[in-house]
Image: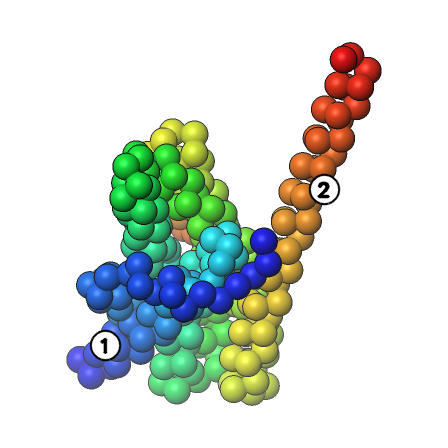
Amino acid sequence: MPVKLSPSALKQTRWYEYGVRFLLGGLATVLAGIASTCFGVAVGGLFLALPAIFCASATLIDSHERRAKEKAGLSGRRRGQQAAALDAAGAGLGSIGLAAFASVFYVMISTTAIGAFAAAILAWTAVSVSAWWLRRKLRMTSHAERLGRSARRRNFFP
Amino acid sequence: MTEYLLRFVAGGLIVSAFAILGDMLRPKSFAGLLGAAPSVALATLSIAVVQHGPRYVAAESWTMIYGAIALACYSLAVCHLLMRFHLAALPATVVAFIVWLVVAFGLLAGFGGVA
């Protein structure tokens, strides 16, 4: 499946769900500031990669999938868990990009602030997308190998 | 107080923008990349660079690398709790937060911050 941008997917989200994300995002940013002030810059830095919003996103994905299945008269529990797990797998790959963001920012900040932000965002995008693409290719290759092995087995032992 | 209000609004807006983009993207595993977007970092580092200067934010971004490694472990833990232990999303993400805390503070204790 190619990467697609589907604005109609926004209809699934209820207005208060945007409010929850805004609130959690704001609180996580305030928390990072408080951590820096109270416990020092090193602890504050850890909180820049806090999974505060992930909790809300995964829960919303779970409930959206569950709702969609229940509308069709089926139990959507397992489907919701699978969708949230897929989102978590994506976040895992994105966190490699986040480490690249922080590394590039650390190297570049002594020269230029705006350049550091631009280069760090580019690094995050490039590394995250590459990691996702690589994982997809590896999965497709191993899936094709599995299919090939089972087809060969069927031919040998009909 | 004004500083924290500014942080709250900036953080909320950036996080919401990434979340909306994530909602629109397909497939879901690709949209999940935005779950680890540097939204809180962008808001915090922009304010910190104006307030404290480049050396301060350099130190902050160094330990952010530990936080990102902890986030990778956290995501993996959430995945396992959902698929193997059949937990719902909310308890899985809350329980796995322990993993984030242990890995992040473990790395900080082991390797330290920037001198």
| Residue A140 location, quadrant | top right
The x and y percentages for residue A40 are: 35, 66
| Residue A41 location, quadrant | bottom left
Residue A41 can be seen, yes or no: no
Residue located 25% across and 74% down the image = B8
Chain ID, mark 2: A
* Label 2 crowd bin: few (<14), some (14–19), many (20+), radius 10 Å: few
| Label 2 and label 1 in one chain | no
The x and y percentages for residue A80 are: 35, 42
Q: Nearer the viewer, residue A70 or B91?
A: A70
Quarter in which the C terminus of chain A is drawn? top right
Q: Nearer the viewer, residue A112 or B110?
A: A112
Q: Nearer the viewer, residue B81 or A146?
A: A146
Residue located 43% across and 58% down the image = B35
- In contact (CB < 8 Å): disc 2 and disc 1: no
| Residue A131 location, quadrant | bottom right
The x and y percentages for residue A126 are: 62, 67
Given this view, does label 2 or label 1 mark the residue nearer the observer? 2
Residue located 72% across and 42% down the image = A141
Q: Amino acid at mark 1?
A: Tyr
Residue located 56% across and 67% down the image = A124
- Which residue carries the number 2 mark? A141
- Which residue carries the number 1 mark? B4
* Label 1 crowd bin: few (<14), some (14–19), many (20+), radius 10 Å: some
Say which element carries label 2: helix
Chain ID, mark 1: B
The x and y percentages for residue A146 are: 70, 30
Say which element carries label 1: helix
Q: Residue furthest right?
A: A156
Q: Residue furthest front?
A: A72
